[in-house]
Amino acid sequence: MSIWIKLLITVILETIVTAKLICSKKGVTDIVCTAGNSDYELERGVVSDQNGITGIHLKSCRITQIKLEAFKGLPALEYLDLSHNSISNLDLGVLDDTQNLKSLNLSFNSIKSLPLGLFDQEPNLEVLDLRGNSIKNLTKGLFAPLKKLRHLDVSNNFLVGRELSPDIFENNKLIKFMDISRNDLSDTPENLFQAFTQIDFLNVDRCFLDKVPAFTTKTNMKTMKHLMLSTNHITQLDDPKIFLNLESIEIINLAKNLIESISENIFKSLKKIKMIILRDNNLRSIPDTLFKGLPKLVNLHLQNNMLESLPVNAFRNSRIKNLNVGGNKITFLIDNFCLELKNSGTNLKKFMFTNNPWQCPCLLDVLVEMRRMGIEYNPDKYDGQQKVCVQQDQYCHRHLESNSVYIDLYQELVELNP
């Protein structure tokens, strides 16, 4: 091999190894960039000064800093993805030449704060994704220019509720999607979302809440359809009026809390509710009329609680199709449970009840009835090869005072057959 060929190969290899950022056009209107082998400071000339570009994709490009004029000369830009980089700060003015921007993704960076005025030249921004950063506070006025904002995600940051100004969202009346989960929202101002008039989805999962916060149920939240309150520290749902204003709600997720008690009238006003998720709580019983008279209720998740009984009255005049009560302490159901539900107006199609300490004769009654009525369940669990119930005699004892005996026997069975 000649010395010139060797030198050429060396130059090519060095170029590949030291390449920092490679950008190319995708179609006529988009620029897509890929990372090289080292961190990179984005400067003018890489993606800037291109009149017809509407989308720039800089995801996972090892960007650590954005120079002030990096986005100069992009009058048509509507979509900018800077997610999954190592950006720690954004200088004031860095976005001033992207006035037609509609979607900005800054998720999964290392941003600690956002300077007041950063969005002053973004009157058309509709989608802003800031999740997965290290933001500790949101300065009052930061979002004021974003009057068209409809989707905001600030989840998985270090926000502290008591330090948030109740006026932070005062100009963001059009927000429909709000995710503020995985922050500390204890002691948050009650009127934090007072400006919202069109909210559709709200996520406050993993926010260290010990009760349903008032800022999620104010009268202006009446347009909301999906509320996520899962994985908090809520212990009681005793106020029957707590969800009274949520007249459009279709899904409420209260999974993985510590709920022990619940008011029998708490869901009564929710005539559009389709799904209630109460799995992974500490419920020992449910009120006799808890889900009664909910004409749209189709999906109900009660698994992994401590329930010993299912009062059939609790489901009358609902439209439940899918019911999950697995992982409780149920040893029997009333005779003809499924038929009683059908006669009361429900339309049960799928019934999941695994990992309960069933009395064997009681379980057999349930299985026979479900097969006869064509109701779906997980038959692989009940194939006769696994220990799924306990039996002391051939009769089903439908008395709660006897439950502790079967629960203890089942626990022993589980421990012997992990």
Image: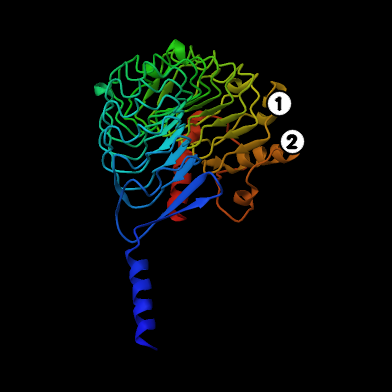
Q: Is residue 75 above or below residue 292?
A: below
* Residue tagged 1: 342
Q: Secondary structure at mark 1?
A: helix
Label located before the other in sequence (2 or 1): 1
94 or 365: nearer the eye?
94
Q: Can residue 233 be seen at all in this image of the molecule? A: yes
Name the residue at the bottom extreme: 1
Q: Is residue 144 above or below residue 241?
A: below
Viewport quadrant of the N terminus: bottom left
Numbered badge on residue 373: 2
Instruction: Answer few, some or many: residues within 10 Å of disc 1's Cα (few below 14, many 20 plus, some between 14 and 19).
Output: some
**Quick check: marks 2 and 1 in contact, CB under 8 Å?**
yes
Instruction: Answer few, some or many: residues within 10 Å of disc 2's Cα (few below 14, many 20 plus, some between 14 and 19).
Output: some
270 or 347: nearer the eye?
270
Q: Which coloring applies here?
A: rainbow
127 or 43: nearer the eye?
43
- The kind of residue on which mark 1 rests is Lys
Distance CA(mark 2)–CA(mark 1): 10 Å
**Image location of residue 198, percent across then percent down:** 50, 18
Q: Can residue 283 be seen at all in this image of the molecule? A: no
Q: Residue at x 45, y 34 (%)?
A: 75
- The kind of residue on which mark 2 rests is Met
Q: Residue at x 33, y 61 (%)?
A: 37
The image quadrant that residue 333 belongs to is top right
327 or 215: nearer the eye?
215
Q: Secondary structure at mark 2?
A: helix
**Image location of residue 305, percent across then percent down:** 45, 34
**Image location of residue 120, percent across then percent down:** 34, 25
**Image location of residue 96, percent across then percent down:** 35, 31
